[in-house]
Image (cartoon, coloured by chain):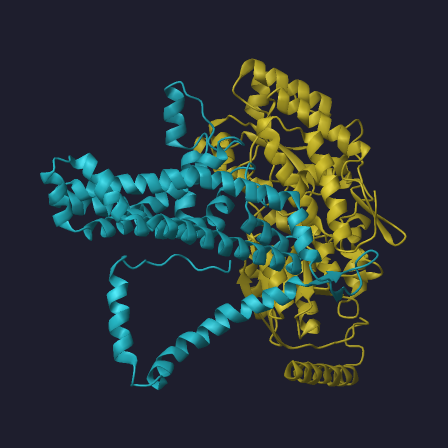
Chain colours: A yellow, B cyan
Amino acid sequence: MKRRQLLLGAVSLMASTALITGCGSTPAATPTPTATEDPSGTITFWSSMAGMDKVAAAFNASQSKIKVNFETIPNGGAGGYAKLSTAITAGNGPDVATIEYPQLPQFVSNGQLQPLDGFINKADTVDKLSDETKALVQFGDQTYALPYDAAPMIMWYRKDMLDKAGVSTPKTWQEFEEAGKKLKAVAPEAHLASFNPNEAALTAALSWQAGAKWFGTEGDSWKVGVNDEATKKVATYWQKLIDQKIVKVQQSFSDEWSADLASGAVVGVLGANWSATGIQKRTEASGQKGQWIAAEVPNWGTPADAFYGGSSFNITKSSKNPAAAAKFIEFLATSKDAITARGNTGSAFLAFPGLTPVAQKAFDASYFGNDIYSVFDKAYASITPGWQWGPNWDITNTALKDAYGKLTSGGKVLEAVDTAQGATVAGLKQNGLSVKE
Amino acid sequence: MVTQAPTKPSIAGQPKIRTQRKARAMSGTGGRTAALFLTPFFTIFALAMVAPVIYAIVLSFFAQQKSGLGFGEAKTSFVGLENYLQVLQSESFVGGIGRLALYCLLYIPCMVGGALAFALLMDAAVARARKLFQLLVFLPHAVPGVIAALIWAYLYTPGVSPIVSALETGGISLNFLDNQMILPSIVNIAVWEWTGYNVIVLFTALQAVPREILEAARVDGAGEIRAAISIKLPLILPALSVIMLFTVIGTLQLFTEPSIISKATASVTSTWVPNMWAYDAAFNRHNLNQAAAASIIIALMAAVLSWAVTRFSSRNKA
């Protein structure tokens, strides 16, 4: 223990000398007010995102002071967060981590991340973001992450099946239900979309779109509304779709889901901008090229959308070189070179202004039947403001997923959100947090 | 989490002679040599087994408490048995134990009964076929648990599985992954995996049954079935009780199969069995203290059950 403290002290001493010399030798080389002007050293970067190895390599090639070692870790669903959290607690986590927005507050709340303030150049990064994305990475007065993608929820359809059913792309949820009925009439075995019991974040996004606020703060207390009025409306509506077999209850990314997309038992995907590659991979061999189109998610009357997924980059508590980590994060989140280096890995839609056109150029969208990026743009413009994630998403996530397990044997969506509300409140209280329902 | 995986048991009857001989040889040479040879084992045992257990016990008496919005530092405080109470009061933990009991009720008769039947058949069969069957029956156990679960998940998933579609063409619509079928489906995986292993244990015990007793029975007019029930079965009871012991402990450790299957269906919740509950507490809810308490409770259950099984079987023997 002592030895580590000594080492830490030495490191911070060195860092501060570097800081002083840094400030002295390069007066106003850049107009930025960052604490450390010229960090150097070796840092590690963990991510589950495809193509990030190439981005790290591009960063290493672009300068000689900082060397980034990249390591692929499993994604959140496969235990990536458990690995990250345990490693940080044990003191051997990476310098830079990739965390999705729902999980971000709990890493902050567990004291596993370092605030970026003082390390990053705020004027060139955070200040240029939209308010909706800023709200996802700032807690209290501090910024804990730079956002990578801003993932608007998107509805994907098989155009040929919509045509066969004689319907146009549904604009509202009511039209969506009617389209589902018409589809059933021409193809009794087909479903217009799936309901994914393993994706609690999707239920959150649907509720967010309807104006729900699952988490908020009131003074020094959390306000939890996992079963608020807007969510109940959403839950009742989806129950109706499930009962009429317009949507099929199945795990997303499962073998069953893949098989159903390929066979045409499911002809739509409620996803996000990042769903494109997954759809292409699963349906390409079945000759569905050109049939899939992106569309704005149906709404409740006025155009509205929500974020579904999206990742941010952070400096963990175990980083001994946060200044170098901050430089790399700035590159990851705001540099066009980073986007270009990642290549044709997916249809990314990025939070930092000016980057999405670069991503669009890198992505080969010829598989799809319409201009998907113009749909993303429209969806992004209608994100409902004011959403906040709670201090421990995993509690809500698990509770909702588990309650959805009963959907195949008579359970109801509405009951599930009630259960999740109860579990969230109880779980947060057990951790000592102050909660109001 | 704390208990060990079953190792190959020794055959009943033999150890007695060996210990006698060893005791005679040991006296006089002194314990120094023994200590030298035992040190490596005990060092690793202390580091990898005893120390973590003690650490878990210590952890289980503390709790990390946050306050307000939870963005400040968490305070660690001694809470006595509070974590244990919370675990035992948790509906999902108790539900997991209930599920495990149901699992045992299905699994133990199927697996032990099946293993016994196979072993007796092999013992009675001709020598050439015996080797082949031994291999075939043992083969599933050579497949690692994770792989087995993945294979079965594929075989259970509707729309992908050849079994499900074959049943469907036969007019039987069965969803192996729904809420009612999921338990038998997981029992099936375990039976497939472990029967072969236990057949080998029982078969080895059967080989040790003195042939003269069997011959005497045959002379008295007992057929194969009569000999199996009245002679072989009572004589391999010690091996059977060893199997029961390992099976019960192994059941408490159920984790791999359900957690793999949970990726394919929502029917398996994240706290489906006690071990998954502990995993969820540690890595999803970030409550290491509660996870430690849950693990200790699981270990205690294993200890009590092992004691009960050995007690029961030794009384049976007498």
Residue sitting at the far right: A219
- x and y percentages locating residue B25 in the rendered image: 25, 79
State left or right for residue B155 relative to residue B121.
right
Residue at screen point 74% across, 41% down: A422
Task: Tally the numbered discs.
Answer: 0
State left or right for residue A387 relative to residue A409.
right
Quarter holding residue A21? bottom right
Residue sitting at the far left: B219
In this view, B276 is above or below A242: below
Residue at screen point 29% across, 85% down: B28
- x and y percentages locating residue B240 in the rendered image: 33, 48
Q: Nearer the viewer, residue A36 or B290?
A: B290
Residue sitting at the far top: A185
State left or right for residue A121 relative to residue A363.
right
Q: Nearer the viewer, residue B174 or A133?
A: B174
Residue at screen point 31% across, 52% down: B238
- x and y percentages locating residue B275 in the rendered image: 54, 51
Q: Is residue B143 visible?
A: no
State left or right for residue A92 relative to residue B164.
right
Quarter holding residue A41? bottom right
In this view, B114 is above or below B57: above
Q: Can residue B95 be seen in this view?
A: yes
Residue sitting at the far front: B318
Q: Nearer the viewer, residue A360 or A298?
A: A298
- x and y percentages locating residue B145 in the rendered image: 40, 49
